[in-house]
């Protein structure tokens, strides 16, 4: 986090309010200026004095204290990002419906800055249709929601609803603070998810990719102002509501969609895990089980990334490499062979990578350029990756010392 970043921390009336004190302290120790707003109910759980002492700033809880300074607007204009932690079911419902009946809800309705919501509540309250619908509506409006954790809840039940870990909250705040409209007016195309290569109507060859990284990239690029097309393989995850989504199943469909929709974009991020081979002959009927072994001959699929590299022109093309050994050497060879501008290297040999919540990425580019993006949630890595793309594009435009600067 940049020293001097200005964060508005809104604390609402849940049992996890005590954890907000630790978050305020971590933000202050990270160099942020932190203003705290509390709901009246939050003050029943933790005293404002705790926050004013930790932040060395006044704590705000009423619309009517010094109203001539219009605190609900002033405080959201001074901050670069807001975080609601914990966010009660009540405040989530109010935000989803535009209700503004206290300082926190009125200020957030007036906010033009990114807002991070950290729900924390009883499992049944969290899972209720009302809360889920409210969270969905807020996500679609651009709020960043940090999912609560699963485990012991204050009411001695176990389930989902614990306030997310502090490191996850800090990661989400970092993403919110870094968000600018830097991609305004640019077309960004992203491929994501696995492909499926059927050998009969009920069986296929695939891989464990969930598309989470590509989906996070699409959402973040949209929030940075880009016109986003997401070409998405089969996945259980929901695509962001605000981006144009083209669903595909096979590698050949992915290829056709990429050539039609991605070629000519300003930025292409090829994050899909496209199957290299497909069964040579797909049976139209289910292949009957017998006691004998089954040999399936596999033939090569078209290489989506290589074709995008051949046709890329002025497009900034970022590829991914999922490697289990010699990660960087293999990725550098792929960077050159496929005419990419940069490549993100993903170690898929351990618990990380496919399907995991967290990942670790290294970005490589020509002339020996290298940047570690660290280990973090996929939303955080998506934001760091886009920062990197933006900086590389700027360097390319500047055309001075581009190849060997350590700019991203
Ligand atoms: C002991 C206790 C613990 C509570 N914990 C939570 C909680 O963790 N999450 C939540 O959404 N509501 C919780 N509530 C209910 C909220 O305090 C209540 O809905 C309140 O109206 C929230 O006000 P606010 O959203 O304006 O802060 C709790 C209530 C009590 C009495």
Image (cartoon, rainbow, N blue to C red):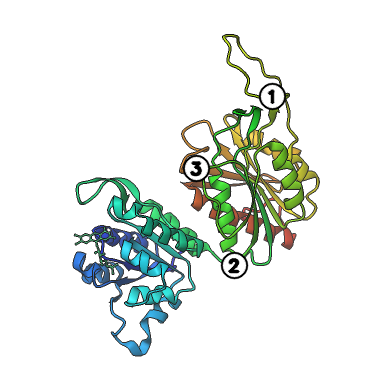
- Residue 64 locus on image (x, y percent): 29, 85
Q: Residue 283, which numbered label?
A: 1
Q: Residue 336, which numbered label?
A: none
Q: Residue furthest front?
A: 285
Residue at 40 percent across and 56 percent down: it is 132
- Residue 312 locus on image (x, y percent): 78, 50
Quarter of the displayed picture in which ligand 1 can be seen: bottom left
* Left or right, residue 156 beside residue 393: left
* Left or right, residue 60 beside residue 328: left
User: Judging from the image, what secondary structure is the residue with disc 2 in?
Assistant: loop
- Residue 226 locus on image (x, y percent): 64, 62
Q: Nearer the viewer, residue 93 or 79?
A: 93
Q: CA distance from mark 2 to mark 3?
A: 26 Å
Of tags 3 and 1, which is closer to the observer? 1
Q: CA distance from mark 1 to mark 2?
A: 49 Å
Residue at 66 percent across and 15 percent down: it is 295
- Residue 338 locus on image (x, y percent): 75, 40
How many numbered badges does the structure rendering display? 3
Image quadrant where one finds the N terminus: bottom left
* Residue 305 showing in the rendered view: no
Query: Which residue is labeled 3 in the image?
Result: 359
Q: CA distance from mark 3 to mark 1?
A: 37 Å
Query: Which residue is labeled 2 in the image?
Result: 181
Of tags 1 and 2, which is closer to the observer? 1
């Amino acid at each position: 986090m940049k020293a001097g970043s200005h964060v508005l921390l809104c604390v609402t009336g849940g049992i996890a309010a005590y954890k907000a004190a630790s978050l305020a302290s971590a933000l202050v120790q990270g160099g942020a200026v932190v203003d705290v707003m509390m709901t009246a109910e939050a003050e029943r759980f933790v005293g404002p004095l705790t926050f004013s002492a930790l932040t060395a700033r006044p704590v705000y809880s009423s619309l009517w204290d010094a109203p001539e300074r219009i605190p609900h607007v002033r405080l959201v204009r001074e901050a670069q990002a807001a975080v609601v932690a914990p966010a009660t079911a009540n405040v989530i419902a109010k935000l989803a419906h535009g209700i503004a009946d206290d300082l926190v809800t009125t200020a957030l309705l007036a906010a033009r800055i990114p807002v991070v919501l950290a729900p924390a509540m009883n499992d049944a309250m969290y899972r209720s249709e009302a809360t889920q619908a409210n969270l969905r509506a807020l996500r679609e409006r651009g709020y960043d929601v940090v999912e609560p954790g699963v485990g012991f809840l204050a009411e001695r039940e176990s389930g989902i609803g614990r306030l997310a870990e502090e490191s996850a909250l800090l990661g989400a705040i970092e993403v919110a603070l870094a968000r600018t409209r830097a991609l305004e007016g640019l077309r960004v195309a992203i491929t994501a998810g696995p492909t499926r290569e059927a050998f009969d109507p009920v069986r296929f060859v695939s891989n464990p990719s969930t598309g989470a990284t590509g989906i996070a990239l699409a959402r973040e690029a949209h929030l940075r102002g880009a016109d986003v097309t997401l070409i998405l393989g089969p996945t259980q995850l929901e695509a962001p509501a605000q981006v144009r989504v083209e669903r595909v199943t096979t590698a050949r469909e992915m290829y056709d969609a990429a050539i039609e929709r991605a070629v000519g974009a300003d930025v292409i991020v090829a994050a899909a895990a496209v199957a290299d081979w497909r069964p040579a002959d797909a049976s139209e009927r289910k292949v009957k089980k017998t006691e004998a072994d089954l040999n399936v001959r596999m033939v090569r699929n078209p290489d989506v990334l290589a074709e995008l590299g051949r046709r890329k022109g002025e497009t900034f093309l970022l590829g991914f490499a999922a490697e289990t050994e010699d990660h960087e050497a293999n990725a550098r060879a792929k960077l050159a062979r496929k005419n990419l501008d940069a490549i993100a290297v993903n170690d898929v040999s351990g618990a990380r990578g496919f399907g995991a919540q967290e990942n670790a990425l290294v970005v490589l580019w020509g002339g020996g350029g290298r940047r570690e993006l660290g280990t973090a949630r996929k939303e955080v890595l998506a934001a760091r990756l886009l920062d990197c793309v933006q900086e590389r594009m700027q360097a390319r435009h500047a055309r001075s010392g581009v190849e060997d600067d350590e700019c991203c």
